Image: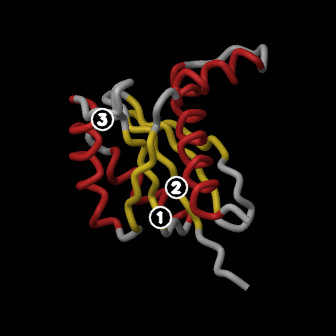
Amino acid sequence: MTKNIKLLGLDVGEKRIGVAVGDSSVRIAIPFDTIEVDNNEIKTIAELVLRENSEIIVVGYPRNQAGEATAQTKFVEDFAKKLVDLGPKIEFQDESLTSVIAEQRLVSYKKPYTKGDIDAQAAAIILQDYIESHYAG
């Protein structure tokens, strides 16, 4: 029996961070919450890591359409460095078009949604992509 690994997915932005949770056995990422960027975000993520027993933090990795690094890539890399001391392994997962796909999903539900909902949904897509590429059965 393989060990069940708890995962936390992050869609890091300059105003908000979308959060998703998942694990390696169920292999389904679930939009969880949105964290406002207010200088307490690392503390909030640390609390989530403890509460969810997360062993891996999957951070969405932005690139432009040509696959090249951007200013946002550097922002996310710098942010991820602040997470290293929290304990879980930090992994990057390509986040190309995840916000677009997230908004399309939310529109299809035919219910009102916020920018925070898009961020949490994008985090779930990032985490789902990671789960499928690392834990496919």
Residue 1 percent across, percent down from the top left: 73, 85
Left or right, residue 39 beside residue 104: left
Say which of 35 and 74 sits in front.
74
Q: Residues within 10 Å of mark 3 (few under 14, many from 20)?
A: few
C-beta proximity under 8 Å, tags 1 and 2: yes
Tag 3 residue: 38
Q: Is residue 93 above or below residue 46?
A: above
Which residue is rendered at x = 57% and y = 19% of the image? Answer: 114
Q: Locate the C terminus and report the quarter of the image it occupies.
A: bottom right
Give the CA separation, mark 3 to mark 2: 20 Å
Q: Is residue 45 above or below residue 135?
A: above
Determine whether, in the image, residue 42 is placed left or right of residue 20. Answer: left
Amino acid at circle 3: Asp
Q: 78 or 46: nearer the eye? A: 78
Label 3 vs 2, first from the N-terminus: 2
Number of marks present in the image shown: 3
Residue appearing at x 52%, y 55% in the figure: 8
Disc 1 versus disc 2: distance between alpha carbons? 6 Å
For residue 31, above or below residue 110: below
The relative height of residue 9 versus residue 18 in the rendered view (above or below) is below
Residue denoted by label 1? 56
- Identify the mark at residue 96; answer none if there is no mark: none
- Residue 76 appears at what percent x and percent y? 29, 41
For this orientation, the residue located farthest to the bottom is 1
Residue position for label 2: 8
* Residue kind at label 1, given as amino acid type: Ile
Circle 3 — which element?
loop
Q: Nearer the viewer, mark 3 or mark 2?
A: 2
Q: Secondary structure at mark 2?
A: strand
Which residue lies at the image location 21% right of the left edge and 38% below the top edge?
74
